[in-house]
Image (spheres, rainbow, N blue to C red):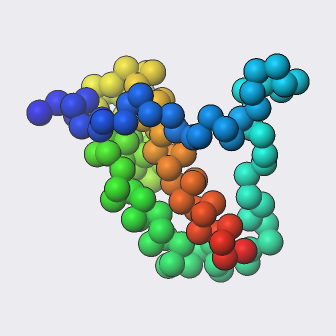
Amino acid sequence: MPFASLAGDDLDAPSYDPAMFLGEGERWAGHWSSLPSDWRGIPEDRLLSSETRAVVAAVLADLPPMQAEVLRLRDVAGWSSEEVRNALDLTETNQRVLLHRARAKVRRALDRYLGDEA
């Protein structure tokens, strides 16, 4: 089975709710409508805690297999984009989309978790 077939069924789903961006006609259309949560007020040990790592692990376990693999290879193993594309037989665009979607899902989970706790 080729890795590309493991991409999941959300290839056309937006990574973020379009309402999170400024709309057409606004000065900065297409830009974020608000800034990400400010994590600077959270103690460093909280960010490094096993509880926070468990949140990330849970998100990774729920990702479509190809998104999870691209994220692991790029952000955990430190592989280059080219190495990941070659290993998984992906186009540059597909690898970039998979990585963006995976990172977006992890970020949303951390925003929810850390935002509620901050």
Q: Is residue 26 visible?
A: yes
Instruction: Pick out the residue farthest to the left.
Output: 1
Q: From the viewer's perspective, is residue 91 above or below residue 13?
A: above
Q: Report the number of numbered marks.
A: 0
Instruction: Pick out the residue farthest to the right.
Output: 27
Residue that appears at 78% across and 24% down: 29
Q: From the viewer's perspective, is residue 86 above or below residue 72?
A: above
Measured as percent of width and height from the top left, residue 75 is found at 48, 48
Asked where in the image residue 113 lies, by quadrant, the reply is: bottom right
Q: From the viewer's perspective, is residue 103 above or below residue 12?
A: below
Residue that appears at 37% across and 36% down: 10
Front position in the image: 79 or 54: 54
Residue that appears at 63% across and 60% down: 111
Residue that appears at 62% across and 34% down: 18
25 left or right, relative to 62: right
12 left or right, relative to 15: left
Front position in the image: 12 or 40: 12
In the rendered view of the protein, which quadrant contains the N terminus?
Answer: top left
Asked where in the image residue 28 lies, by quadrant, the reply is: top right
Measured as percent of width and height from the top left, residue 17 is found at 59, 40
Measured as percent of width and height from the top left, residue 50 is found at 50, 79
Q: Is residue 73 visible?
A: no
23 left or right, relative to 3: right
Q: From the viewer's perspective, is residue 33 above or below residue 39?
A: above
Measured as percent of width and height from the top left, residue 99 is found at 46, 38
In the rendered view of the protein, which quadrant contains the C terminus?
Answer: bottom right
